[in-house]
């Protein structure tokens, strides 16, 4: 009885691995490490005192996935693997559609072949585009504005069609708002490659001295201080939401859609203040014009997740900033460099490539 976690080495995946292990699940992880480092999974083991195997497999590698399903008695899949940078998706749409949409189709084909039909999928509040009203309930109109968002919307539709064709499928579509923060241990957190696109990692890197100053994108929105408002959610709360969603899909077949947010919005300048308070560091900033594609305000209606999953976010903005800061100052460069350490860590940390002879035979038939 094993949960397959795709993209488990990433930011949200690694935190969810911790919560799944703490909840008593056995897990196996696949990740192609295109945006992560195996060190995160080593640290998941340190935090939990539990062990599991990781395989450097790409979602597009159907045979590799098949081997995992043959090797393990997989009952459910928590599917994080995907590319997530909005700007990059605009310049590289084919890459995004191939990786995210085709990758998910291949995963579902392999699941279907192996009669595994429980799936928790990482969707995003980006599927709402610019909302007509806030807080945003799950039934709002979906109107994505970029290729990344469209991959999430398309995958949601594909998964709904899958359930129509075979009601045995049980699927949770989790629409995340703005995940921030880190595990309280300071051992795992968000480690963006290059200059961060998102607000909190940017602020953290200014605080630790990696970047000079924050650029605030617009102060002429119709909000309390003119800057954009978002629903920031602690990544640990978000991860616990996945554990609850897994129970739901196991107990009740269907397609279950949930917003995972706090229901409360904070402006950019409120976040700057909260981070200054948590870190004791001053965050320098300048105001620039609006970032193309940004929306003024976005926060979740969270009632459905509470009513149906018994889940609500517990951690407030101070805890989010304090945990993000602990992770940042303890790991100013993120995880050790991917180029130099990846292979060693892979070898050391029970991460293995394998082709068991029996399964190989089955695959060749
Ligand atoms: P992340 O980049 O840290 O994690 C994604 C992981 O998937 C990485 O480890 C990456 O190496 C892996 N991956 C990507 N393509 C793969 C492939 N083809 N095969 C195998 N592994 C692959 O991102 P995250 O922030 O942890 O996000 C996890 C999921 O949640 C993504 O699907 C993302 O779109 C979604 N999401 C994230 C946010 C956010 O703000 N972080 C918001 C909404 C939704
Ligand atoms: N912002 C700045 N300066 C920065 C970065 C961001 O002022 O350097 C502002 C933005 O203009 C926005 C707010 O901070 O008002 C939050 O921006 P983020 O980039 O952190 O987050 P977004 O809400 O724009 O988007 C994120 C993810 C999307 C996802 C969405 C909803 O990047 O992929 O949350 O989950 F879809």
Image (tube, grey):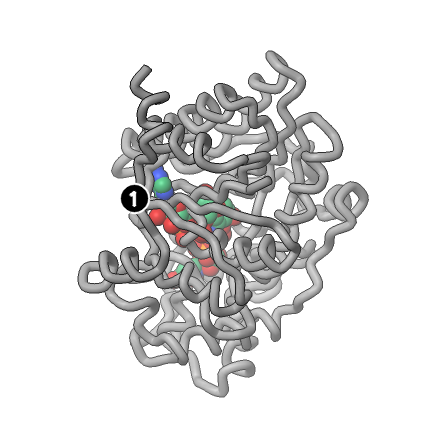
Q: Residue at x 33, y 40 (%)?
A: 57
Q: In the image shown, does 269 or 279 lie closer to the viewer?
A: 279
The percent coordinates of residue 164 (x first, y second) are: 63, 15
For residue 62, which quarter of the picture? top left
Residue 64 vs residue 144: left or right?
left
Q: Is residue 343 visible to the viewer in this orientation of the structure? A: yes
For residue 90, which quarter of the picture? top left
Q: Is residue 223 visible to the viewer in this orientation of the structure? A: no
The percent coordinates of residue 122 (x first, y second) are: 52, 41
Q: In the image shown, does 336 or 268 lie closer to the viewer?
A: 336
Identify the residue at the far top of this view. 165
Q: Residue at x 67, y 42 (%)?
A: 245
Residue 176 vs residue 344: left or right?
right
Q: Residue at x 33, y 58 (%)?
A: 37
Identify the residue at the far front of this view. 358
The residue singled out by tag 1 in the image is 353
Number of residues whose C-alpha sits closer than 10 Å to that of mark 1, classed few (under 14), some (14–19) or many (20 or more): few
Q: Is residue 143 above or below residue 350?
A: above
Q: Residue at x 48, y 63 (%)?
A: 44
Quadrant (top left, top right, bottom left, bottom right) of the N terminus: top right
The percent coordinates of residue 21 (x first, y second) are: 58, 56
The percent coordinates of residue 9 (x first, y second) are: 41, 53
């Amino acid at each position: 009885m094993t949960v397959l976690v795709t993209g488990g080495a990433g930011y949200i995946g690694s935190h969810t691995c911790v919560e799944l292990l703490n909840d008593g699940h056995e897990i196996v992880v696949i990740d192609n490490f295109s945006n992560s480092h195996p060190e995160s999974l080593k640290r998941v083991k340190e935090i939990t005192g539990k062990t599991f195997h990781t395989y450097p497999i790409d979602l597009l590698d159907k045979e590799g996935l098949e081997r995992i399903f043959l090797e393990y008695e997989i009952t459910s899949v928590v599917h994080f693997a995907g590319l997530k940078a909005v700007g990059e998706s605009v310049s590289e749409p084919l890459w995004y559609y191939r990786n995210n949409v085709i990758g998910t189709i291949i995963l579902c084909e392999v699941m279907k072949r192996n009669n595994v039909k429980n799936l928790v999928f990482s969707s995003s509040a980006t599927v709402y585009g610019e909302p007509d009203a806030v807080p945003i309930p799950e039934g709002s109109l979906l109107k994505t504005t970029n290729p990344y968002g469209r991959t999430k919307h398309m995958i949601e539709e594909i998964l709904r069609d899958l359930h129509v064709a075979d009601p045995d499928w049980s699927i949770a579509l989790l629409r995340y708002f703005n995940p921030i923060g880190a595990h309280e241990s300071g051992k795992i957190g968000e480690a963006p490659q290059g200059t961060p696109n998102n607000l909190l990692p940017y602020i953290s890197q200014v605080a630790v001295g990696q970047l000079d100053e924050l650029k605030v994108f617009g102060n002429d929105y119709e909000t309390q201080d003119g800057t954009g408002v978002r629903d920031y959610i602690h990544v640990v709360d978000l991860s616990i939401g996945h554990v609850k969603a897994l129970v739901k899909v196991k107990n009740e077949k269907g397609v279950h859609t949930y917003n995972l947010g706090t229901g409360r919005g904070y402006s950019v300048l409120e976040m700057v203040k909260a981070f200054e308070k948590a870190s004791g560091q001053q965050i320098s900033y300048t105001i620039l014009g609006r970032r193309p594609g940004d929306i003024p305000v976005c926060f979740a209606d969270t009632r459905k997740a509470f009513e149906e999953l018994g889940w609500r976010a517990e951690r407030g903005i101070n805890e989010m900033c304090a945990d993000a800061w602990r992770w940042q100052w303890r790991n100013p460069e993120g995880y050790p460099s991917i180029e130099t350490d990846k292979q060693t860590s892979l070898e050391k940390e029970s991460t293995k490539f394998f082709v068991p002879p029996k399964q190989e035979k089955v695959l060749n038939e």
